[in-house]
C-alpha cells in the first residue's frame, strides 16, 4: 500500500462523520472509459440489469466487475483499494459492485436507509467492517438527485424497526428498487436530521466519496435533465466475509480473495 498524506485526516473524518471525500479523483480518461463500458453493458439483456419499476429505464447495473474488463480493472485501481484498505484497516475484497444510473427525469429515489441491515439480515455479514466507495460518473449537483447522508449517524448502529422486527422476505428485488425493503422511518429521520444535519454529496465526474455501512442515507428523484450515474464499490474485510450468502452472485460476490491492485491508476 502506498503512503498518502491524506489518510490520517480521511480516516479520522470517516470515523467521526461516517463518510469522507479524498482530494484524489479519477481522471477524465478513466471516467470516459467507465461511461463507455456502462453504456455498452446497458445495450445488453442481462440479469444484472435492474429497471425503474414498470419501465424500460435502466435503474442500475450490478456485478459488472465479474464480466467487464474495464469494471474489473476499476475495482482494482490502486487509489480506490488503498483508500478502502486504509479505512478498513486490513485486506479487503469486492463484496458488491453497482452503477446507479439516475436517468434524467426518470431516475427514481432511494428512501432513507442503512446498507448494513441488508448485508447483515440477508447475507449474514457479521460486522459493518465494509466500506462503500462511490465514484461519480457524471457531475453530481443538488439538482440531479445527489446522495444525502446524515453525518455521524453510523455511530448509532442499526436503527429503526427494519433492523429487528421485520421478517426478511429474501427477495433481492426489494433491495434494489425504489420501494426498498429496509428503510428508516420518517419520524426517526426527522429527529436525526435535527440532531446531526444532512449533507448532499455533490462534486464533478470522477470525484470519490467513501461512506460507512451504517450511515443513514437517501437520494431523491432526478427531476433534472442531467443524468446522475454513480459507481458504488463495496469493499469488505476478508475476515468479515459472510459464510453462506444466498442472494445472486452479482449482488454478493462469493470470491473473497483479497483484491489485487493493477499496476497503475490508469484503466
Ligand atoms: C444506495 O443507497 O445504494 C445508492 C443511492 C443512490 O444511488 O442515490
Ligand atoms: Mn444504500
Image (spheres, rainbow, N blue to C red):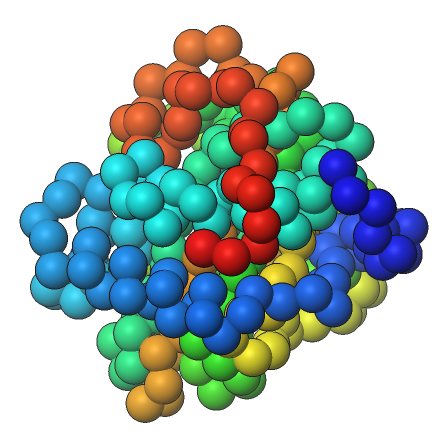
Foreground pick, 207 / 61: 207
| Closest to the observer, 240 or 136 | 136
Residue at the limit of the structure toward the front, as seen here:
263
Residue that sits furthest to the top in the current view: 243
**Relative vertical location of residue 143 with respect to residue 82 in this rendering, above or below:** below
Q: Quadrant of the C terminus?
A: bottom left
Along the line of sight, the residue nearer the viewer: 192 or 84: 84
| Left or right of residue 193: residue 174 | left
Q: Is residue 52 left or right of residue 229?
A: left
Vertical arrangement, residue 113 with respect to residue 131, above or below: below
The percent position of residue 122, horizontal first and vertical second, equals 43, 25
Q: Is residue 173 visible?
A: no
Q: Quadrant of residue 245?
A: top left
Which corner quadrant of the image does residue 148 belong to?
A: bottom right
Coordinates of residue 57 in the picture (x, y in percent): 17, 66
Q: Estimate the x, y position of residue 186 in percent, counting from the top left.
A: 56, 60
Residue appearing at x 53%, y 41% in the figure: 262
Question: Which residue is at the front of the view, 61 or 261?
Answer: 261
Q: Residue at x 62, y 46 (%)?
A: 78
- Asked if residue 143 shows in the view, the reply is yes
Q: Quadrant of residue 174?
A: top left
Q: Count all numbered tags in the image, as a single digit.
A: 0
Q: Residue at x 49, y 9 (%)?
A: 243
Residue 124 position in % (x across, y down): 51, 18
Report the side of 9 relative to 220 (left or right): right
Location of the N terminus by quadrant is top right
- The vertical placement of 252 against 264, above or below, is above
Question: Which residue does the image show at 44% across and 81% down from the upper left?
Answer: 144
Amino acid at each position: 500500500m502506498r503512503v498518502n498524506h491524506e489518510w490520517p485526516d480521511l480516516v479520522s473524518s470517516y470515523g467521526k462523520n461516517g463518510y469522507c471525500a479524498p482530494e484524489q479523483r479519477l481522471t477524465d480518461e478513466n471516467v470516459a472509459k467507465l461511461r463507455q463500458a456502462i453504456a455498452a453493458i446497458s445495450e445488453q439483456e442481462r440479469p444484472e440489469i435492474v429497471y425503474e419499476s414498470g419501465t424500460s429505464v435502466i435503474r442500475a447495473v450490478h456485478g459488472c466487475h465479474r464480466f467487464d474488463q474495464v469494471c474489473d480493472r476499476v475495482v482494482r485501481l490502486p487509489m480506490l483499494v488503498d483508500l478502502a484498505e486504509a479505512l478498513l484497516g486490513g485486506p479487503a475484497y469486492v463484496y458488491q459492485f453497482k452503477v446507479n444510473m439516475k436517468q434524467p427525469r426518470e431516475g427514481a429515489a432511494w428512501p432513507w436507509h442503512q446498507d448494513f441491515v441488508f448485508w447483515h439480515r440477508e447475507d449474514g455479514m457479521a460486522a459493518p467492517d465494509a466500506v462503500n466507495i462511490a465514484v461519480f460518473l457524471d457531475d453530481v449537483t443538488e439538482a440531479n438527485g445527489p446522495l444525502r447522508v446524515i453525518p455521524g449517524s453510523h455511530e448509532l448502529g442499526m436503527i429503526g424497526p427494519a433492523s429487528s422486527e421485520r421478517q426478511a422476505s429474501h427477495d433481492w428485488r426489494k433491495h434494489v428498487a425504489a420501494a426498498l425493503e429496509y428503510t428508516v422511518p420518517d419520524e426517526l429521520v426527522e429527529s436525526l436530521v435535527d440532531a446531526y444535519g444532512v449533507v448532499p454529496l455533490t462534486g464533478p465526474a470522477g470525484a470519490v466519496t467513501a461512506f460507512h455501512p451504517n450511515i443513514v442515507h437517501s437520494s431523491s428523484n432526478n427531476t433534472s435533465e442531467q443524468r446522475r450515474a454513480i459507481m458504488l464499490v463495496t469493499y469488505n474485510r476478508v475476515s468479515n466475509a459472510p459464510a453462506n450468502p444466498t442472494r445472486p452472485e452479482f449482488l454478493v460476490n462469493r470470491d473473497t480473495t483479497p483484491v489485487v491492485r493493477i499496476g497503475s491508476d490508469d484503466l
